[in-house]
Image (tube, rainbow, N blue to C red):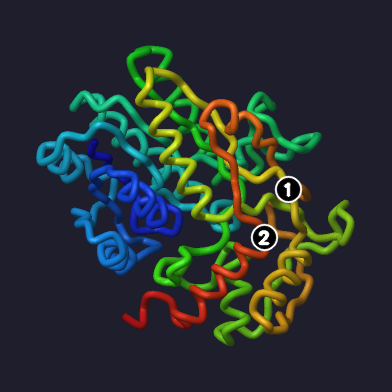
Amino acid sequence: MRILVTGGAGYIGSHTCIELLMAGYELVVVDNLSNSCQEPLKRIEKLTKKIIPFYNLDLRDEVRLINVFERYKFDGVIHFAGLKSVGESTISPLKYHHNNVSGSLVLASVMKKYGCKMIVFSSSATVYGDPDVTPIKENFPLTAVNPYGRSKLIVEEILEDIFNADKSWSIGLLRYFNPMGAHKSGLIGEDPNGVPNNLCPFISKVAVGRLKKLSVFGGDYDTPDGTGIRDYIHVVDLAKGHVKALISLMAKPQLLKVNLGTGQGYSVLEVIKAFESASGKIIPYEIVQRREGDIAECYSDPSYALKTLDWVAKKDLSEMCEDAWRWQINNPVGYSED
């Protein structure tokens, strides 16, 4: 089977490419490299001894995307491509909707034109907004407290409309929680451009001396230590969830909505301590103002994923930190050293 992976050069996309290749799939990757580079794909080819055709294009460029579909027959798509910073989305909402929503519309239109009706969409726990209770189940009300989350929710609704209009589609909406960690090889990891938006790469860059201290956004939440609580999931576990989703979607046309998380919430300060233990480094930090669009607590109920996909997260927080640190010390300036 041949799968198109959009955003496949990114953090989650690159780890998923490894798992897909190891599971026997053929891949083609498209990515505009706005927050990534081609180097991880080259490293994946070395690790797996398999070739990944790559096209540097933006999904909103329909003509070039059609050219890719003309060249290959795809059995399905895994759709990662999109902007993902909560903070930036509150400042530039038009940018987020134009990129995330418009790109997805063009992709779905081209898929329909070429009879490719299977897609796994990289959604987010942000579609639940600020839930009244935790853990979060798939049947919770959907809303959004920031433009990033709203763009994900809009794409979910578009894909659901497509399925309701044509039940021969097979669509998976995977709502992830907070990915961390890196590939065991130390060759593939998270390397965002500029100052990181996610906690783990920020901590890693502080630990390796690239940043002076960590900014902890908010110390006055209604949580045990005042810092935000999140469900951190190892990126390799998350990647394996996509393989399981493909298997399920291939079995029959359906609309799947599944949380991918561990079911365990950790505060920012708990993650800092775990990373200090894994790295042997002290992580200087300061509590700063809350970030607009953030919520106090967010963690999943992963039981539905086990039931529907036969998937469960297996790696704990210490392994996430150990793998992230291995990636960082092996690549102190990320992929740019290459």
- Reply above or below: 113 against 73: above
Q: Where in the figure is residue 40, as x and y percent of width and height? A: 34, 65
- How packed mark 2 is, by other alpha carbons closer than 10 Å (few <14, some 14-19, many 20 or more), is many
For residue 129, the mark is none
Identified at 68% across, 84% down, the residue is: 281
Which kind of residue does numbered mark 1 sit on? Gln
The residue lying furthest to the left in this view is 71
* Mark 2 and mark 1 residues within 8 Å of each other at the beta carbon: yes
Q: Which residue is mark 2?
A: 317
Quadrant of res 205: bottom right
Q: How many marks?
A: 2
Q: Where in the figure is residue 118, as x and y percent of width and height? A: 33, 28
Q: Where in the figure is residue 216, as x and y percent of width and height? A: 73, 68
Q: Is residue 197 left or right of residue 13?
A: right
Q: Which residue is mark 1?
A: 264
**Quick one: label 2 or label 1, which is nearer the N terminus?**
1
Which kind of residue does numbered mark 2 sit on? Leu
Identified at 14% across, 39% down, the residue is: 72
Q: Secondary structure at mark 2?
A: helix
| Residue 55 in view | no
- Reply above or below: 5 against 338: above
| Residue 164 in view | yes
Comparing 338 with 188, the one in front is 188
Q: Where in the figure is residue 11, as x and y percent of width and height? A: 44, 59
Q: Is residue 105 left or right of residue 111?
A: right
Query: If the image is split into quadrants, where does the C terminus sit?
Result: bottom left
- Reply above or below: 156 against 164: below
